[in-house]
Amino acid sequence: ARPELPAARALAARGLPARTIDGFLRPLLAALLYDPDLTTSSRCADLALRAFAGGRLALPEGGAEALPEHMARSLPPGTVHTGVRVTSV
């Protein structure tokens, strides 16, 4: 098994051409993982790439913009508040 590294370091260690990493893999993983710096675990990145390549990733009707609404609908009423400023978590 490969060692667990930040995804950015793991990509660099695989010996792929910079054009492949910077032009395709980095932007794709940044979007899939919502992590522009690719600090996410390399194992999580591998899983996301496998799922993407296998065609098992999908977005709800309405695209990425519909994801927060879709997720909020699955929670109890009053759990998600929109249009308010977050002051603490």
Image: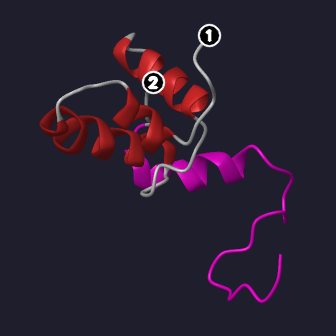
Quarter of the image where the N terminus is located? top right
Graded by Cα atoms within 10 Å as few (under 14), some (14 to 19) or many (20 or more), the crowding at tag 1 reads few
Front residue (pair 67, 23): 23
Q: Residue at x 66, y 47 (%)?
A: 71
Badge 1 amino acid: Ala
First in sequence: mark 1 vs mark 2: 1
**Which residue is under mark 1?**
1
Measuring from the top left, give residue 40's x and y in whole percent. Answer: 58, 44
Horizontally, residue 46 falls left or right of residue 20, namely right
Quarter occupied by residue 87:
bottom right
Q: Residue at x 45, y 57 (%)?
A: 37
Residue that protrudes farthest toward the left in the picture = 19
The range drawn in magenta is: 61-89
Whether the magenta-drawn stretch holds residue 82 is answered as yes
Horizontally, residue 72 falls left or right of residue 39, namely right
Q: As displayed, is residue 37 above or below residue 43?
A: below
**Which residue is under mark 2?**
57
Quarter occupied by residue 14:
top left
Q: Main secondary structure of the magenta part?
A: loop
Q: Residue at x 40, y 48 (%)?
A: 30
Q: Which mark is residue 81?
A: none
Front residue (pair 44, 13): 13
